[in-house]
Image (cartoon, rainbow, N blue to C red):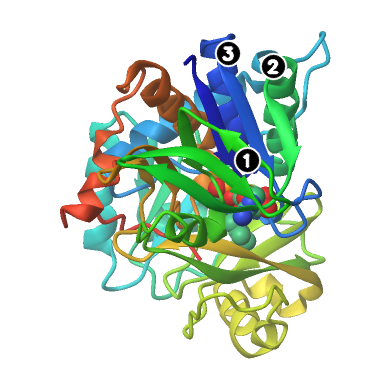
Amino acid sequence: MSNQVVVIGGGVMGSSLAYWLTRLEPSAGVTVVERDPSYQHASSALSAASIRQQFSTPVNVLVSQASIAFLRNAAVELSVDGDEPDIMLREVGYLYLAGAGGAAALREAHAVQRACGADIALLDRADLKRRFGWLNTAGLSLGSLGLSGEGWFDGYALLMAFARKARRQGARYVNAEVCGFAVEGTRVTEVIAADGSRLACTHVVNAAGPWARRIAAMAAVDLPVFARRRTVYVISCPTPMTPFPLLIDPSGFWIRPEGAKFIAGFSPADDLDDQPLEPDYDSFESHLWPALAQRIPAFEEAKLERAWAGYFEMNTVDHNAILGPHPSLENFLFMNGFSGHGMQQAPVVGRAVAELILLGRFETLDLSDLLFTRITENRPLREANVIG
Ligand SMILES: Cc1cc2nc3c(=O)[nH]c(=O)nc-3n(C[C@H](O)[C@H](O)[C@H](O)COP(=O)(O)OP(=O)(O)OC[C@H]3O[C@@H](n4cnc5c(N)ncnc54)[C@H](O)[C@@H]3O)c2cc1C
């Protein structure tokens, strides 16, 4: 039987995979099953869509380097009949700030990043003040600034571009909700939808984002990925401040420009699973605003314009992607658990999982460190730089 790949979830991961499968093997049969083509609650539609090189794990730095190369060329790569998508990539950098006790960790991560060839500079307090006059440097010991290869883009535009190109290359998108599998021995033979339809498959891929744990459970696989709500606050501030990279404060918040406004967030202390996707408005006044105004005095005059909430698909074991087959089911592959850095990894992870399916191995970039087996064999690969 020739390849019949069923991809569960048509967000940026599922659509990147569908694009790469049909690009690398035009005869591959690819069906993407998506229950909500409006993507109302999908992380890919609610993302802050930013990309950084500043990770603590080498494999993540290498993924980001390949990803930024793809994003820079996305207009050409994903064009359809000469119509080029505009993903609005802005390479403005990330600025990690360390307080009194944080400099050693920043230097350690910097060594990893430099060894991987990332273009990152360490800045002392005087450098920080010189470059970013709007910043209150009191209490800071060090900063780490991406000089290239970091910034943000339009994540929804990237999702749409992957899906459009995948369709053009022959992928089929089906509007249905997956509710189970037929399994024979160590293989999934059919994907079963709630409307009773059944799709025969040579491979099935879990690309269900924050809902991936439920899909895994349908095949009796325990996937340590949990839906954790994150609120994104849209803030206006009358004082112009340039340049303004994506700033990560030692107190835990992040903020970056979004057009003429800013977006910001933080990770809540009570990080519960599956909370309703209602923004946490109360925490703006009680938590975020005071911290913002302390670090950036101009934000005393800031105004909350609106907010939205989406789910991080949090891998609670080690905060890294979980890729490839589960040892008990040879043709059930996973691309889950990105823990807040999935949008930027989608172009590269899509290709890597496509290679696993088509060739049985990674070819372009070795992502073996991220295979599911590290979880089942209890060899976690902890990512220290998780934002928000
Ligand atoms: C607020 C926020 C900020 C973020 N910021 C960043 C960032 O700055 N940089 C970054 O790299 N990443 C960021 N992320 C993370 C990134 O957006 C995600 O990692 C990425 O979008 C995950 O894509 P996905 O395709 O796996 O999941 P999703 O986009 O959620 O897609 C999964 C799809 O599966 C479908 N589905 C689920 N169950 C079923 C079923 N049973 N049957 C059929 N379909 C099903 C869903 O409808 C959904 O469309 C952020 C996320 C959030 C929420």
Q: Which residue is mark 3?
A: 23
* Residue 165 visible in the snapshot: yes
Q: Is residue 252 left or right of residue 151?
A: left
Q: Which residue is mark 1?
A: 198
Residue 131 in view: no
Q: Earlier along the polypeptide chain: callout 1 or callout 2?
A: 2
Q: Earlier in the sequence, mark 3 or mark 1?
A: 3
Marks 3 and 2, the one that precedes in the sequence: 3
Residue type, label 1: Arg
In front: label 1 or label 2: 1
Viewed as shown, does residue 290 lie left or right of 96?
A: right
Disc 2 element: loop
Query: Residue 9: which numbered mark, if any?
Result: none
Q: Amino acid at mark 3?
A: Arg
- Give coordinates of residue 326: x percent, y percent: 31, 45
Q: CA distance from mark 1 to mark 2?
A: 20 Å
Three-letter code, disc 2: Gly
Label 3 or label 1, whichever lies nearer to me, is 1
Q: For the point 64% across and 43% down, which residue is it? A: 11
- CB contact under 8 Å: marks 3 and 2: no
The crowd level at tag 1 (other Cα within 10 Å; few <14, some 14-19, many 20+) is: some
Residue nearest the observer in this picture, 181 or 9: 181
Percent across and percent down for residue 59 are 30, 37
Q: Which residue is mark 2?
A: 170
Query: Dot 2: within a 10 Å radius of its alpha carbon, few (fewer than 14), some, or many (20 or more) residues?
Result: some
> Residue at the spot x=37%, y=59% of the render?
220
Q: Are marks 1 and 2 in contact (CB under 8 Å)?
A: no
